[in-house]
Each structure stands twice: as C-alpha cells, then as structure tokens.
Amino acid sequence: MTSAENSKNLRTLALDGLWRDNPIFRQILGICSTLAVTNLVINTFVMCAALTLVTAMSCLTVSLLRNRTPRNIRMMVQTLIIGFYVVIVDVILKAWWPDMSRNLGPYVGLILTNCIVMGRCEAFAGSNKPLAALWDGLFSGLGYSYVLLAIAAVREMLGMGTFLGWPVPYFSSPYWDKWIIMVMPPGGFFVLACVLWITRSIKPKEAKK
Amino acid sequence: MIRQTQSNWLRKQPIMRKVLLALVPCVLGGWYYFGIQTLALTLFCCLWGFFLEWLFCRKRGEPVSEAVFVTAVLFALTMPAGVGWHVAAVGMAFAVIFSKEVFGGFGRNFFNPALAGRCFVYICFPIAMTGVWQPPAEGPWGSLTRWSSAADEDGSIAVTSATPMAHKKAGRIQFGSWTEPALPASLPFQIDPAGGQIIVSKWTMMKGLLFGRIGGTMGATSAVLITLGGIYLFVTGTASRTIILSVIGSYAVFNQIFYWFGVAPVPGAWPAVLGGGFLLGAFFMSTDPVSSPRTEPARIIYGILIGLASLVIRNFSIFNGGLMFAILLGNMFTPILDVAGQNHCRWEGKSMSQKPLYAIGYMFIVTAFFSALIIGFARGTQEQVAVNERIAFEKAVLRAFPEISFTTDSQAHQYFQQHFELLPEADGAWVYTKDGIAAGYALPIEGKGFWAMIRGIVGIAPDRQTILGLAFYEQNETPGLGARIVEPFFRDQFKNLTIRPQGLPVELRPAGSALSSGQVHAISGATQTCMRLKVLLNENLQNWLKKMSEKENRQ
Amino acid sequence: MNSLGAEIWQAVVVCFAAVFTNNILLSYFLGMCPFTAVSREVRTAGGLGAAVVFVMTFTCILNWMAYRYVLVPLHLEFFRFILFIIIIAAFVQLVEMLIDRFSPALYQSLGIFLPLITVNCAILGASLFMIIREYSLIVTIGYGFGSGVGWLLAILAMAGIRQRFNESRVPEGLRGPGITLIIAGLMALAFIGFTGVLS
C-alpha cells in the first residue's frame, strides 16, 4: 500500500465515522449507554470522551492481536479487551473525579455493552491494520460524540437554561419558562428523534437500510 | 400548492362534528366561569392546530381533517384559566406534530393527541399548569362580559395554588356528614396550604363538583355540563358505550373498594368520579375512536386498565392528573389488547398455539423454584451491609454540624462514638456533646423523594431556634438535577438558618427570588425533588419540635 | 415484623417499582438497540422479552453472589464490569446449550433469542444498578425480575403498535428508528405518571 492510498483511506474512514456511516443517525447503535446522561452537557462530555477513548484503544488492541487470536473465541477476547479499558476509565474517574463518577453511576460500565465498540472491533479492527483500526475507532467515537453533545446542549439549554452549567442569556432569564420535560427521559427520546429526522432527511436515499 | 375549492381544505367528518357539538356546553361553561379568555384560548388553539396540520397535509396533498378541531378544543378545555399562551402553543404543537402527524396524520396515531399534548406541557411547565388557579365567577352573568374572572377592580389577581381535589388529596378538605356542617355553604376557594384544614359537608362538595363553582381547568369544573355532552355521545353511539361504562364503572368500583378498606387519600366513588375532570376524560378522550381498541373484550379490559391506573396515579403518585396518564397508558397497550382480543395471534398454525405461553409459564416456574432455593441457601451478608450503612449514617451526622471536620471513616466513627448519644429526652434525635456541654441535636429525617427515599440529618442548635446544617446519607434523585441537593451550594444554605416560628419551619423559594429568614433557594429544574424535600424536612422538624416543646411544658 | 418478612416485602415493592416507576427502558434508556431492532412483530418481541426476564433474573442473582463473595472479600470491586459480562455470557451460552439439548420446542420459541441478549445493555445495567443501590440478595431477585418484566411490557406494547402500523405515510427521515423513538418517548411520558407511587 503506497502512502498516498493510505492517506486517502484515512480520510474516507474519518468521513464515514463522522457522517456517511455515523453510528447514531445512520446505524442507530449504542445510544443506550449514553442517552440517559445527556441531560447535562458536562456528563455527556465525559461519557463521550470515555467512549471515544475506549473505542479507539480497543480497536487498536484488537487489531494488534488479530493474527494471534483464534477465530472461535474472538468475541470473548474482544469483550475482555474492551472491559480492560472500561475498568481503566472507571478507576481513573473514581480516583480523580469522584463526583463525576457518582453522577454517571453505572453508565461508565455500560460502555462495555455499547454496540459501537463491539461493532467496530468485530467489523473493522479484526481484519485491518492497527493504524487504520485506531483511526476508524477514533472517528466512530467522535461521530458519536458530537451528535450526543448536540442533543445534550439542546436538552440542557431548554430544560435548565444553562450550558455546561453557565447561564445562557435569555434561556436563563424569567422570560423563558423552562421546559422541565427536556431533562427528563421523554425529552431524550424526542430530541434524539428530531436529530434523526433532520439528519436522515438530508440524504433520504441512503437512509433506507 | 394551494387547492381551490373549500372541500379540499377540510375533510368533512360527521363524527367529529357530533363530538364538537357535545363539547359546546363545556366551552360555554368555561366562558361563564372564567371569562372571554376561555373562548380566545380555544380559538387560538384551533387556528394554531389547523395551521400546523395544514403544513403537513399540504406535503401529502390532503385536506386537513376536522378532527384537529376536536383535539384543539379538548386541549384548550384542559388548560387552567389564565395559562400562558406559549404553554398552549407548545402543547398544541406537540399534540399535532409528535403524536399525530409524524405517524401519518388522522387515523394513524396511537396516542390521543390532545392528551399527549397536555401531558407534555403538564410535565414541562409544572408551575404554569398546576401552580395557579383562577376563581370561577359567581352571579347570574358570571364573567360572560369580562376577559378573566380573576382580575378584581383594582387589577389585582386572585389565585390559589390548588384545586379542591388536590386539597382533598392533601387532607386539607375533610368531609362531615351529608348536611353538617352547614358552613361553609360553598366550597372555599382558598385554603392556607400551611396546615389549614376545612370541614365541609358532603353536599357542599358535591354541589361544587356538579355545578363547577370550583377552581380547576377551564372546561372540566362542572360535572353536569360534561355529562350533558357525554350523554349525547352515549345516546347517539358516537363514542363507544362499552368504553364509557367500563372506564367510569371500574374507576368508581375500585375507588369505593379502596375507600371501604380505609386506604388513606382515596376519596370514595362519587367525589372521584365527579371531580377533577374525570368525566371529561372518560367521555371524550378515552373513547377516541382512533386510539382506543376496536374489539369489545379489549375495550372492557382497556377501560378497567384506565380505571385502575388513574386510581393509582391520582391517589399515590406525585401528580394529580391521574386520568390523562392512565389514558395514555391505555392507548399504549391498545394494539396489544386488540391482538389478544381478536385472538388471532399468528403463532404459526394450531399446534404451536400453546407453545409460547407454555414457555413463558415454564420460565416463571423455573425462576420461582430456583429463587426459593437460593433464598434458603445464602443469607448472611447483612452484617457488612449494616456496618456500611452505619458509617454512612455517622458521617452524615457529623456533616450536619459544619464545625466538625474529619478525613477518614475510622476518624468519623471515633468522633461519633465520643460525642453523640441517643438520649430518651431528645425524642429520636442524637444529642451532640462537646467539652461536656450540649452543643446541638442531630435529627434524622426521612421521606419520599422524587424517585426513592431521601434520608438525612438536620443539625439543630441546643435552643432549637436555628438549624446548624443539613446532610444526606441516602438519596437517589435525578443525576444532575435533584441529586444536587447533596452539593455544598445547596446544603450550605442551611448553615445557621433560623427556624421560622410561624407556619412551616423552613420555606423553599424559587431560585433567584428574595429571601427572608428561614427561607432558602430551591434548585431550579429540580422542582419535584425540592417540593418533596420541603415536605419531608418540615414534617420531620415540626413533629420533633412539637414533641420537644410538649415535653418541656410538662416538666 | 421480622427481618425476612420485611425484606421480602421490600423485594415486592422494588419489583413493582422496577416495572412501573423506574422502568429500565423508558427511564434509563437501557436495552435500546434490541428494542428498536426487534420490535416489529408481537411474536418475536414476546420471545425476546421472555428470554430477557429469565436471563436478567438469574444473572442478577449470580452477579450479586460473585460480587459479594468473590470481589468484595478480595477488594477487587473495580473488576466487576469484566466479571459480570463474563458471567452473563457464560450463563447465556449454558442455557442455550441446555435448552437446545433438552427442549427443542422451547428452543424454537426462546432459545433463538439468547445470543442477542449478551449484548443487551439492560442485562448488565440491571446488575450494575443493583450493586450501586446495595440491594440485599432477596431484593435483588425482585429487582432483576421486575426490570425484566418492565422491559418485556415495553417491548410488547411497542411491537403491538408497530405491527398495526403502516409506515408509508410517516415523514421519510423518521421512518424506522425515528418513529420508534417517538413512540418510546410517548410511552415514557405515560409512565412518568407513576412517579412517586412506590419508593
């Protein structure tokens, strides 16, 4: 593989993760573990950072081990690898950011069953070179993160009138009757549905699975 | 693309016209009781709903269905008088777009749009929807010529914070016999929420509910007016009779049974059925032909489900609007009830028909069997749990006194052992002794939070006039919202807080408002948690303070 | 009241709370992937839901014991994510094999859904919640069972709706997962009514 080809590949991979194959609005994967914490931007940010890190590193590790892993137990090995990184993230949060760790509750651990991580490891990292796998995992995670951050920003602003805890002009003033429902579960479903509606309307041909 | 002829704009629907006709008494009643604003809001909802629906229908090349007016009128009738128009606009938008048009327009929705819209704003704007009620007008002409019934001559606005049904639920209205006491002759509009209690005769209550001289939503105050329309629907067969009978019947029966068993806030059959707009929902909303079941057996079960769920929600949940949630739940299970009702689940031919049921039953039995085995097999970890809880409790006690500092668990435990004692004269509070003198009381408090129990400690000065601090050792509130009660910014407000001698010992005010002594700011966005916290804190405090002062007086 | 009786009562309360007030799908968003993917037909949804009830109850029990008797004594609590998922995967595999061997009919209606379950985050989520909330074993059984039943109820209602439903008139961008999310949102709205009923 020449270097020119390689770089083009990387660009395609990045674009795939960010838009064409976006985990959320194209594949509808992995929303479980994070949607619940999207009522605050800061929580979402930490969750997404953790998820991106875990995805990228797991993809790298799976790819490095791809030629030594027997095929029939590869799922088990992948789970172990992902679990390893999830534990690391959890321990770091517990040790240095205990409040955040308590806020997120069990959701950090649930990255383990997030379909994106498993999906990227199984579909791409298991049969590609380490660098490409890392790149793919990173951009899948980023593609996931920016959508969820957008959802969180909408929910926090409408529901609490703040962004990252800072009051937003107008939305934090008495003129804005706060939409309490936005920080409650139904709000999460509706905002995500709206995101799907908008993004899938842009390229309706591709949306059909 | 704009169509030319009138009929292409609007699809004629005779059934919907009958429903609209049946709603006329309620609208006129709303006009009489709450003024011209009722008509204005209804009209606004109709126009706004029509416009939104037209946007979607135009895309599909269809005329707008008349059902949207039924939705709009029903929605407007369930708004409290004087509600902000932005609330109505958001609610109608949600009703038309998210519970109807996204499913493909009229006849394709699964949830009653008016109710979905109302539920949405009910949760979204709790203060606007449940915090302010206007008084209904009196006299032969009511407020037919006025914009609103609430504005007095001097322009001040008379409002109250709860409806009669809410007062009843909270125990502020108690029943006498049918005729006694003779006064008050009509339901009082305002009752002091802090400990006020009024005894009325049952006849007074019933009169209020029947004729609508009570605070409430615009169209749902008078049971007589609703029933007029309801009977029309029933007789003409416009609405399913099975559903009407099943909903009202099961609700009345369940209520009466619970009432006989003495379950606390259940008011008995007639106040429940006549009150709080139950009839409006039962006649007009639960019978929506699109979102209710189509088979007869399913309709009966649907009605019972709604009756039971609204009983549970109205009496035991933190929300008063039980019926609307119950109907949404009913809507949610409508298709599956129909599947069961028609008994045409396609389980791949006859011989397989028993198998899935068998599998599920088998699974339940296996689960029960092994669970029983395991319970018998392993019990013996209580000790460790108890130790953990004990430490959390002790740490909370210490945190309730901001002057005490500690770093490790064992340090906390030691300090607690040395300085705190549970003395009988302190009535359940721990006595804090420092350098041989009493330095305060640590009163454990507990009560229902938004999601689960909240348990904590209030530190109280020895003279019982001041709160020294507040700490929690158990709560499971919404992360980032209610759960912020444990954060210093909220708890610090209780440092050296004077206990109010009159009314509630501690008052929570909306964030940002001015405070006087004994008041603290609630957390914005966590209204429910704060409301609950206020109740449990004050109940615990009041009880304890009362007991202590009684004890003192005896000595 | 003796402590065992009180605990069983608490288990019953927690069980009902897990079905209605704290529904694992509608208020914690767990198990969304299979919920959106496998809710087109009542029959399959029922099968999957029943399998979830079964697996969730037992993995909660197993994980509780593993946590209390292995991880806590060894001070390896942080290791629980990995141990839990291994236990879940192993349990699912074992049950699948047993059912396949001994009851082909049951395998047809339940067993085929078992592989889907390992990656259902509701299962792992229930185990993690029960640890965080420090439930006792008996209460854990109630919680695991209730969470499973709550999930089953939600997916059954959703499948009933979608089976009757013709998507041809839904706006294009919303077809499939989008409309499913909106229905789920409306369900969550209805379930909020139960807030505060049980605690």
Image (cartoon, helix red, strand yellow):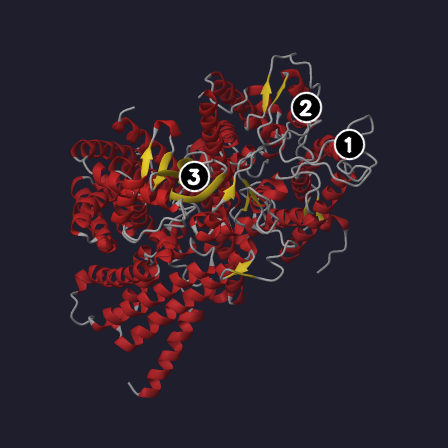
The chain identifier of the residue carrying mark 3 reads C
Query: Which residue position is annotated with label 3?
Result: C21
The mark closer to the camera, 2 or 3, is 2
Query: Which residue position is annotated with label 2?
Result: B187
Badge 2 local density, few (<14 within 10 Å), some, or many (20+)? Answer: many
Q: Kindly identify the residue that appears in the image at 73 percent across and 58 percent down.
A: B2
User: Is A24 rendered above or below residue B241?
Assistant: below
User: Is B305 rendered above or below residue A167?
Assistant: above
**SS at mark 3?**
loop
Q: In the image, what residue type sits under mark 3? A: Thr
**SS at mark 1?**
helix
Badge 2 vs badge 1, beta-carbon distance below 8 Å: no
**Residue B508 locus on image (x, y percent):** 55, 42
Rendered image: mark on residue B428:
none
Tell me the quarter of the image containing the N terminus of chain B. bottom right
Quarter occupied by residue B234: top right
* Distance (Cα) linking label 2 and label 1: 18 Å
Q: In the image, what residue type sits under mark 1? A: Tyr
Do callouts 2 and 3 point to residues on the same chain?
A: no
Quarter occupied by residue B113: top right
Badge 2 vs badge 3, beta-carbon distance below 8 Å: no
Query: Which residue position is annotated with label 1?
Result: B32
Q: In the image, what residue type sits under mark 2? A: Leu
**Residue C179 locus on image (x, y percent):** 50, 52
